[in-house]
Every structure is written in structure tokens, then in C-alpha cells.
């Protein structure tokens, strides 16, 4: 650890010792404990305070390191982190099977991959906040990996107010990941997925015609899109293991890219669930979407809490399709316009809220009225706002399941809705089902 990183701890010790001990002495002792005796930072601070007759309980500066400060080959690393993902895995060590846990840990500075070499000592789940003492780090493909070995102690932190890890380029990890855990900026991936669809396209890259094979892929945790810059002869349904590649974000949604330098191997088809089972919009929480910064093809179940201004019957500029106000486009001025229908709404699922954009066809279905019928209603009332009022009546407080792609921009997350359906929660039926499961008549 650098002197700069030690500075707050030197101040902390000096404060507890009532300024009786010179800072240079403290700095020297701390350096010796950490780098010569290799004891964890917390223990080092307590020892120095005790040695000079102070009360170690009065120490306050956090000894926890930030993930973005970690470098390869550090020992005695203490962390306060949120479990972003944790996956069990059986490996073979000296001919014996051993269960480990691998996944991703995060704090407010980023995320890193970790391996707990004994699964019984890491019973923690996605979302839990844990205190880790005496971890060590390794370098791996330009990124840092956290290891929890025999010396590591992990405890659950009851105060789970730790801020969520950032999304986007700040989050950099490498190694074995699931689709759900992909973040923009990851390199050197180790990932197994099933190709759901693939299509060859010609694109122009810096004046050169190239072929790109793009499509969608999935594992049991989610779906995303991919681009392959090499013909790996991928077919829909193939199960593939990729070693290498990188992920980049399109409007906040991480996508996978790989080319001829990466290692792609086709696996047995039964390693993952079938194409039909994987090609569904998995239900996610809005909190999870915020953590991921968006996702392709997901479903959210919640309540419509708002139908915003600009919903209902709108008129679009015939040049650029922007919505015109009082016959005027912000770019093209006074223009010809064509009518359209849409909903700009907000859905809340208890973990957060999400903006949704619903296009003409679904809006017509939701209202049970065509665009023509709505136009007639608006003309009769001399006010196109009547259509928005109808939508408010129909939608607000309605429990729905919305699915589509979730993108993010400066205004936050937004789902481009592909499907809306009602969710029916029949309380009596639910209760009967629970009683039946419990064996009560
Ligand atoms: Zn225009």
C-alpha cells in the first residue's frame, strides 16, 4: 500500500494517541507492520495504538480498501463489498472434487471478479453486503482478481446501505461470467452461451466492406446480443464456450464482441437449457436493471404509476418523425404532420421505477380504440388530451407485465415495450394453492 493510501490511517492513529507520537514514527511503524510483518491493516493499526498506550477501540477510519485501488499480488486485503453474483462450481484438485464459488464483488468504485476456494465459507447470495478480511489479489488479463483462501474471513454486514456498483466503463472484470453479469469494458471473458439466432451482414468499416455475424445469445441468467468479426460457422442452437472477446455498451446495454483472435469452442448441446427455454424474456427487478444499466429482452412486473404528458394522440413531423407542438417541429418549423399514438409511462415494481415507451399498435390495443377512432374523439372534444385522459383511466394503478429492451441514457432507464399483459393476482386462489402445498385441506 502506498504512503498516500496510508495517510488517513496515520491521521487516525495520531488522533487516538492524542498527538503524543510523531507522525513519521507512526508512518514508519505502519509501513513495517504491513510490509515486513505482513499483517492486515486493521491489526496493524490496533497494534500500534496499543503499543503506545492508546485505546484501539477509538480508531475510526475505515480499513476497507476500495476495489478500484486494488493491484495484483496484494495480500491481507480487507473489503466491504456487495455480492453482485456468486456461482458454485465443482473443480478437480489432485483427483478430488472440490466445490468453489466464483462471481463478482462490487463497491461504489467498481466491480472485480472473485474466487472463494472453499464454497462452505462463502454461503452468500447476490445482493448481500459482506466484510472480507485477509483476501489476496492476482493479476489476470489486465484485471485484478480477488481470492479468498484459507486465511480469509467473510461475514455478512447487517447494514446493507453500501451504494451499488457503478455501471458502464468503470466496471472492469475478466474471467468466468454469466450473461447477467456482463458489463461494458470487460475483456478476456470466459463464458458459455447458446446462440439463439445469427445472421451475416455486410458492413462498411473505414471504407472497407466486412462481414459481421450478429445475433442473440443466452445462458440461464439472461439474453444479450453479439457480433462476431470472424466466421465461426455459428448456427442457431449451438452451445459455445468463448475464451476472450470483450463487451461494449450500446445505449447502456452490454453486448458481446469477438473475432478471429478469440478462442471459440462448440460444446455438447445439453450443457445449457434448450433454445425454447432460453429464448424467453426473463423477469427482472428494476433494481437489478439499474445495477446493469439496461438489458435486452427482459420483462418487468409492476404497477403503472404514471401516464406522462405527451401520451395519447400525438402528431409527428413528416420530415423527421419528431412530435410537433402546435403544428411546429423543433427542427423543421411549420410542417405537415401525421397522427400517431403512444404511451410514455412509468412502471414501479417495488424495487424502483422505470420509464416505458409504448408504440401505436399496443396503445390501440390497450384503449380498445383505433387511431382513427381516437382522432374522431379528439375532434369532437376540440382537445387531443381526452385520449391521454382515457389512457390514465385505463392504465394507472393497473398491475402489468411489460417486456422489451431496456436502454439507458441521460434520463435514466427506459424500456421500449414490445408486449404488455395484465397480471392477475387472485388472492383466494393463491391462498388455496399455499394451503394445498402445506397439505392443509
Ligand atoms: Zn421535423
Image (spheres, helix red, strand yellow):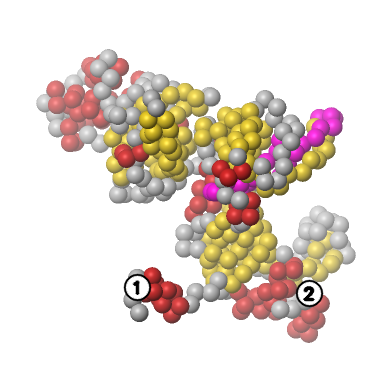
Location of residue 70 with respect to 108 vertically, above or below: above
Discs 2, 1 touching: Cβ within 8 Å: no
Residue identifier under label 2: 371
Q: What number is the disc on residue 355?
A: none
Q: Secondary structure at mark 1?
A: loop
Callout 2: 10 Å neighbours few (<14), some, many (20+)? Answer: some
Q: Residue at x 81, y 59 (%)?
A: 321
In the picture as drawn, the residue positioned furthest to the bottom comes out as 380
Residue 418 at x, y percent in the picture = 68, 61
Q: Earlier in the sequence, mark 2 or mark 1?
A: 2
Residue 69 at x, y percent in the picture = 43, 28
The reply, left or right, for residue 42 in relation to residue 113 is: left
Q: How many marks?
A: 2
Q: CA distance from mark 2 to mark 1?
A: 52 Å
Q: Residue at x 58, y 45 (%)?
A: 270
Residue identifier under label 1: 439
Q: Residue 213: in sight, yes or no? A: yes
Q: Residue at x 60, y 74 (%)?
A: 395
The reply, left or right, for residue 128 in relation to residue 252 is: left
In the picture as drawn, the residue positioned furthest to the left comes out as 53
Q: Residue at x 61, y 51 (%)?
A: 274
Location of residue 118 with respect to 322 vertically, above or below: above
Q: Which residues are magenta?
A: 206-229
In-front residue for pair 7/375 = 375
Q: Residue 354: in sight, yes or no? A: no
Q: State the quadrant of the N terminus.
A: top left
Residue 141 at x, y percent in the picture = 53, 24
Q: State the quadrant of the C terminus.
A: bottom left
Of helix, strand and loop, which mostly describes the magenta segment?
Answer: strand
Q: Secondary structure at mark 2?
A: helix
Location of residue 306 with respect to 48 vertically, above or below: below
Whether the magenta-drawn stretch holds residue 219 is answered as yes
Amino acid at each position: 500500500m502506498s504512503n498516500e493510501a496510508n495517510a488517513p490511517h496515520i491521521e487516525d492513529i495520531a488522533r487516538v494517541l492524542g498527538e503524543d507520537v510523531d507522525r513519521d514514527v507512526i508512518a514508519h511503524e505502519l509501513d513495517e507492520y504491513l510490509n515486513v510483518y505482513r499483517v492486515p491493516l486493521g491489526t496493524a493499526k490496533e497494534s500500534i495504538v496499543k503499543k503506545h498506550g492508546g485505546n484501539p477501540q477509538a480508531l475510526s477510519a475505515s480499513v476497507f480498501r476500495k476495489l478500484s485501488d486494488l493491484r495484483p499480488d496484494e495480500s491481507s486485503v480487507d473489503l466491504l463489498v456487495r455480492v453482485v453474483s456468486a456461482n458454485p462450481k465443482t473443480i478437480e484438485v489432485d483427483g478430488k472434487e472440490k466445490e468453489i464459488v466464483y462471481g463478482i464483488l462490487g463497491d461504489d468504485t467498481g466491480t472485480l471478479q472473485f474466487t472463494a476456494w472453499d464454497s462452505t465459507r462463502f454461503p452468500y447470495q447476490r445482493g448481500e453486503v459482506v466484510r472480507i478480511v485477509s483476501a489476496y489479489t492476482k493479476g489476470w488479463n489486465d484485471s485484478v482478481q480477488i481470492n479468498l483462501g484459507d486465511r480469509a474471513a467473510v461475514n455478512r454486514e447487517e447494514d446493507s446501505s453500501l451504494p451499488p456498483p457503478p455501471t458502464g466503463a468503470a466496471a472492469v472484470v475478466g474471467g468466468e461470467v454469466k450473461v447477467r453479469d456482463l458489463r461494458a469494458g470487460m475483456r478476456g471473458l470466459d463464458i458459455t452461451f447458446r446462440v439463439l439466432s445469427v445472421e451475416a451482414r455486410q458492413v462498411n468499416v473505414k471504407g472497407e466492406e466486412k462481414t459481421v455475424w450478429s445475433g442473440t445469445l443466452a445462458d440461464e441468467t439472461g439474453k444479450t446480443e453479439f457480433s462476431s468479426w470472424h466466421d465461426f460457422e455459428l448456427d442457431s442452437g449451438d452451445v459455445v464456450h468463448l475464451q476472450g472477446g470483450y463487451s461494449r455498451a450500446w445505449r447502456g446495454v452490454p453486448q458481446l464482441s469477438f473475432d478471429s483472435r478469440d478462442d471459440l469452442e462448440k460444446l455438447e448441446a445439453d450443457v445449457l437449457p434448450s433454445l425454447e427455454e432460453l429464448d424467453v424474456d426473463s423477469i427482472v427487478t428494476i433494481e437489478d436493471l439499474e445495477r446493469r444499466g439496461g438489458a435486452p429482452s427482459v420483462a418487468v412486473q409492476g404497477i403503472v404509476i404514471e401516464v406522462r404528458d405527451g401520451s395519447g394522440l400525438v402528431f409527428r413531423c413528416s420530415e423527421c418523425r419528431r412530435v410537433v407542438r402546435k403544428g411546429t417541429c423543433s427542427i423543421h418549423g411549420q410542417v405537415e404532420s401525421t397522427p400517431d399514438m403512444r404511451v410514455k409511462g412509468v412502471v414501479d415494481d417495488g424495487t424502483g421505477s422505470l420509464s416505458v415507451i409504448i408504440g401505436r399498435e399496443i396503445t390501440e390495443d390497450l384503449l380498445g380504440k383505433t387511431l382513427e377512432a381516437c382522432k374522431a374523439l379528439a375532434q369532437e372534444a376540440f382537445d387531443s388530451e381526452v385520449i391521454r385522459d382515457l389512457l390514465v383511466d385505463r392504465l394507472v394503478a393497473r398491475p402489468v407485465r411489460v417486456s422489451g429492451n431496456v436502454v439507458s441514457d441521460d434520463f435514466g432507464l427506459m424500456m421500449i415495450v414490445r408486449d404488455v399483459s395484465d397480471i392477475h393476482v387472485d388472492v383466494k386462489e393463491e391462498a388455496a394453492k399455499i394451503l394445498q402445498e402445506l397439505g392443509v385441506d
